[in-house]
Image: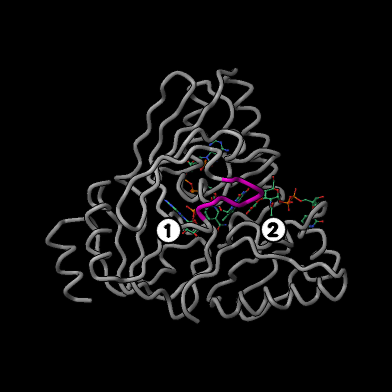
């Protein structure tokens, strides 16, 4: 590991940290350490780092803003790449936007609105990176990434950069091909349309108010914990089961939105996982519905 860190430092790939607690990089503020944490300073830093990691045959994972991740308490063995500053270029060309994977998805929505471009209003309250959103097919208010993505640049483990079209992504509800095949989204191109600045701003303000009213935005959380089952809402089922406020350790079913689990202070991943299992058992017994987590659970317990 020390040899790897030495090589990464010599190549000046960006920020390189040993045993970095991932609780510092997830919105749940939960997660054990990554053996090696790399925040590349730019694209060439990422490509160089990937080559070195590949040579050392270490497992790796990429994260964005950690807003859909439950990292187990013993952390992640191998390397974690975090895409943030340095991979965050933004360029509007008529009604098309080219954006780096490390760019904030919320900020992108705000910037597109300022340009008078419509299509990204739904993203106004989704607190992740563009890369995470492309991978997750993030969505809200009746829209999602699949409606606007033209193409994405993806780096494979072998170090090749390929262009994926919208069709290649095989998008479905909160699913993309990347969830099966892996790869690192480097950048995305979105097709928007010219619209009315005021109408765009009004729609975003309306969505923002709705979120403030219905979601526990002030407490550490990861958004919806479970996918919605067909033709229903996990939040409705969990509330109807009387589980709002139910707590294991410092992990609690939000009083505001039953499909959110909030960290009341020092919740561990084990607390959250126990609560997830408890909810799944209650809902299966009561409604014969198997709730499937939307959040990704990674690392060692
Ligand atoms: C308050 C709150 C509200 C939310 N509301 C919504 C909502 O309305 N709709 C919605 O869809 N989600 C919502 N979420 C969940 C979350 O914001 C999205 O899933 C988001 O797209 C995750 O992006 P991220 O950068 O944080 O990804 P991370 O959590 O860091 O990672 C999630 C997954 O994406 C992968 N990934 C991240 N970056 C890349 C990359 N560059 N290349 C390849 N894979 C990558 C990771 O490996 C991981 O598997 C909400 C979360 C919170 C905290
Ligand atoms: N509960 C949790 O665990 C988490 C919740 N969040 C929530 O997500 C939101 C932003 O997250 P953050 O990581 O700070 O994002 P960023 O730092 O990437 O960007 C947020 C910026 O965009 C602005 N903004 C956000 N939404 C809108 C909108 N609909 N219309 C116009 N401007 C908007 C914000 O202004 P302004 O401050 O005025 O809204 C802020 O300046 C916040 O509401 C935050 O509460 C984020 C992470 C974790
Ligand atoms: C937050 C996320 O995405 C959210 C997205 O922000 C919103 C808005 O479009 O719609 C989905 O939530 P949701 O289905 O729970 O939407 P909401 O509008 O909050 O609730 C739906 C229905 O459930 C009911 N509901 C919700 C919460 C609750 O505690 N009790 C309850 O009865 C509501 O009354 C409403 O009738 C996405 N969740 C999923 C899993 O698809 C996320 O993916 O992380």
Badge 2: few (under 14), some or many (20 or more) residues near its Cα, within 10 Å? some
Residue 280: x and y in percent read: 74, 73
Front position in the image: 164 or 206: 164
**Magenta stretch, main secondary structure class:** loop
Quarter of the image holding residue 183?
A: bottom left
Q: Distance between the Cα atoms at labels 2 and 1?
A: 20 Å
Relative to 37, say whether 109 is above or below.
above
Report the disc number at residue 123: none
Does ligand 1 reach within 8 Å of label 1's beta carbon?
yes
User: Left or right: 257 with respect to 118?
Assistant: right
Relative to 27, say whether 120 is above or below.
above
User: Left or right: 117 with respect to 230?
Assistant: left
Relative to 115, say whether 106 is above or below.
below
Residue 224: x and y in percent read: 65, 58
Q: What residue lies at 52% left-to-right and 63% top-to-bottom?
A: 69
- Residue 232 highlighted magenta (yes or no): no
Front position in the image: 290 or 211: 290
Q: Earlier in the sequence, mark 2 or mark 1?
A: 1
Q: Decide: marks 2, 1 in contact (CB < 8 A)?
A: no
Relative to 90, say whether 253 is above or below.
below
Q: What residue lies at 62% left-to-right and 74% top-to-bottom?
A: 251
The residue that disc 2 covers is 227
Say which element carries label 2: loop
The residue that disc 1 covers is 63
Does ligand 3 reach within 8 Å of label 2's beta carbon?
yes
The N terminus appears in which quarter of the rendering? Answer: bottom left
- Residue 172 highlighted magenta (yes or no): yes
Front position in the image: 48 or 266: 48
**Which residues are drawn in magenta?**
170-178
Q: What residue lies at 26% left-to-right and 65% top-to-bottom?
A: 53
């Amino acid at each position: 590991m020390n040899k790897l860190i030495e090589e990464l430092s010599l190549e000046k790939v960006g920020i390189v940290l040993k045993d970095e607690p991932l609780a510092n990089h997830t919105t749940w503020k939960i997660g054990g350490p990554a053996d090696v944490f790399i925040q590349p300073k730019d694209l060439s830093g990422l490509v160089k780092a990937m080559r070195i990691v590949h040579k050392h045959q270490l497992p790796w994972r990429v994260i964005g803003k950690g807003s859909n991740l439950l990292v187990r308490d013993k952390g992640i063995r191998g390397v974690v790449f975090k895409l943030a500053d340095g991979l965050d270029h933004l360029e509007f060309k008529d009604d098309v936007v080219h954006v780096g994977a490390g760019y904030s998805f919320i900020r992108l929505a705000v910037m597109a609105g300022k340009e008078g471009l419509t299509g990204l209003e739904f993203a106004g309250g989704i607190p992740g990176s563009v890369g995470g959103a492309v991978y997750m097919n993030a969505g809200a208010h009746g829209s999602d990434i699949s409606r606007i993505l033209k193409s994405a640049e993806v780096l494979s483990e072998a170090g090749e950069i390929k262009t994926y079209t919208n069709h290649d992504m095989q998008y479905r509800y909160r699913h993309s091909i990347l969830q099966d095949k892996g790869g690192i989204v480097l950048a995305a191109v979105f097709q928007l349309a010219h619209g009315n600045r005021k109408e765009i701003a009004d729609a975003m303000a309306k969505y923002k108010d709705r979120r403030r009213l219905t979601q526990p935005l002030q407490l550490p959380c990861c958004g919806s914990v479970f996918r919605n089952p067909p033709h229903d809402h996990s939040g409705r089922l969990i509330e109807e089961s009387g589980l709002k406020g139910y707590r294991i350790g410092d992990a609690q079913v939000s009083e505001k939105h039953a499909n959110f689990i909030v960290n009341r202070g020092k919740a561990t991943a084990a607390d959250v996982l126990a609560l997830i299992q408890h909810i799944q058992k209650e809902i299966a017994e009561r409604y014969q519905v198997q709730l499937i987590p939307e959040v990704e659970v990674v690392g060692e317990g």
